[in-house]
Image: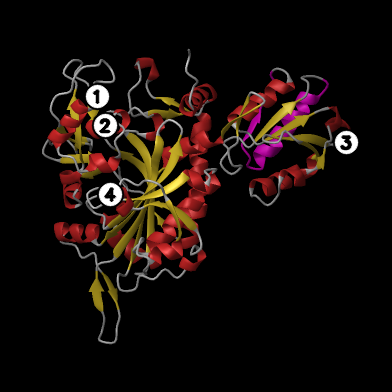
Amino acid sequence: MKQPKDKYEVVSEMGKRRGYFWQSYEIYGGVGGFITYGPLGSLLKRRLEEKFRRFYLQPLAILEIETSVIMPENVLEASGHVENFKEPTVECTKCKRKFRADHLLQEFGEMTDTETEKMALQSVVDELKSHNIRCPDCGGDFNKAEQFMTMFTTTIGPYSDSVGYGRPEAAQGIFVEFKRIFESARGRLPLGVAQIGHALRNEISPRQGPVRLREFTIIDIEFFFDPEDKKCLIINDVGDETLRFVLAENKLKGITEPVTITIKEALNKGIIKEEWQAYFMAQAKRFLVEMGVPEDQQRFIEKLDYERAHYSMQGFDQEVYLERWGWTEVSGHNYRTDFDLSRHMKASGVDLTAFKESEDGGKRFVPHVIEPSFGLDRLVYVALEYAYTKRNKRTVLSLPRDLTPMQVSVFPLMNKDGLLEKADEVYHLLVNEGFTVDWDSSGSIGRRYARADEVGTPLGITIDYGTLEDGTVTLRDRDSWKQVRSKLAELPSLLHGYFCNRLNFEDLGQIIER
């Protein structure tokens, strides 16, 4: 009996067919860990970036910079990445394919990341054997485990001793440029600096599409503050927000059921140590809700000492439940203290301190850092999976209106009697107003509605004979399939209000009763 397709499979098929995403280099058989965004996928990714800036960066006047993807070796030696950016790998004795050992144990041995994180290399091999886990490709056995450097290595210029790496995160670009940024910001703290850009990780065996990539877009925010003056003045804005926590102390007991706690309670009980970290975690939850992910499909999992990155004093992963992959990290929230600035200051000899005045003249100090970090490609996939629905056996991609790639579809009811020309006029009117507009005059109007529903276009505008007579058009809602009649002259202002969430669909015109 044929197994039903899960969400990942149907979303991936839809992504290929409708121009969202597909595996890169398909004509050469494809290469794992790389995807290509099609026309709609590129727009969706850009919409997510824009929404993130509006929601997360602009309210706190967080500055944004852009630094290079290739980094010299001494930068990543100072940051600790050369020493620590390694993962356990095993090789199949039969087909010679290599796999990340902890992921095999988690996928086929049903072990948790907590259980695999602290295992020695030999223990990894022993566990693979005890769970009878063999090569997923050919069924062969695995040999001994080894540590594999997961940064891409290159040389800078023609000299082989000038080693460089593809950056595994965007954060180090912010830390090494802190002095210039701090000066341009007139020496103010707290100071938020963000970078949205490509990062590279030479993943051992990526087999999860957009969820695990070798080249991906990361959003790193480094929020610098005085460790002696670290109060978040806007913490009350999120104090009553509830988060679902999987606590470290419960993980050690094998308890993974989340507990729901308000931000205020989490701070009072010391579950979250820093107010700014709590604020950014609350905002991360709210952002995912606005993307269409319900609260009960999100959780924050506290990292144990041996699970945390080398730079982190306290860390939480924000996870979202995906149908195929289960609980999947979409953002990480770490208190990096002064680790990075102190390391770079020591390695470079450059002063990266801040100065504050006091009654006795003042003193210099190294700022501390809270870091929220998001994987943008994972957010793209999460948005698609949670938007994918069926209605009367028809696919409807119910993306939030501020994320949808194509905002409006224009449909001439017939391809004659001046309707094509009028539809063309409406199309250019809306394009000139800044909307992304699709034109579809192929097939029946029902088929055209179905195509627009599948790619997620929230509004369809039908140009019919009534348009020629009285200057009105029919607007159709993607999700409810309701229709309203609107005046063409008012259309631009109505649509601007709708896509800024100031107007609902029912506000766009006179409801057409069926």
* Residue 133 numbered mark, or none: 1
Q: Nearer the viewer, mark 3 or mark 2?
A: 2
| 76 relative to 3, above or below | below
Q: Residues within 10 Å of mark 2 (few under 14, many from 20)?
A: many
Instruction: Pick the residue in front: 192 or 339.
Output: 339
In three-dimensional space, the C-alpha distance between marks 4 and 1, rounded to whole angstroms, equals 25 Å
Residue 364, percent from left and from top:
24, 74
Residue 135, percent from left and from top:
24, 20
SS at circle 4: loop
Does the residue at mark 1 contact the one at mark 2 (Cβ under 8 Å)? Answer: yes
Viewed as shown, does residue 69 lie left or right of 22?
A: left
The residue where tag 3 is placed is 470
* Residue 252 numbered mark, or none: 4
Does the residue at mark 3 contact the one at mark 4 (Cβ under 8 Å)? Answer: no
Q: Residues within 10 Å of mark 1 (few under 14, many from 20)?
A: some
Task: Compare marks 3 and 1 and give the one earlier in the sequence.
Answer: 1
Residue type at the position of mark 3: Asp
Task: Compare marks 1 and 2 and give the one earlier in the sequence.
Answer: 2
Q: Is residue 374 visible?
A: no
SS at circle 2: helix
Instruction: Pick the residue in front: 71 or 452.
Output: 452
Task: Compare marks 4 and 2 and give the one earlier in the sequence.
Answer: 2
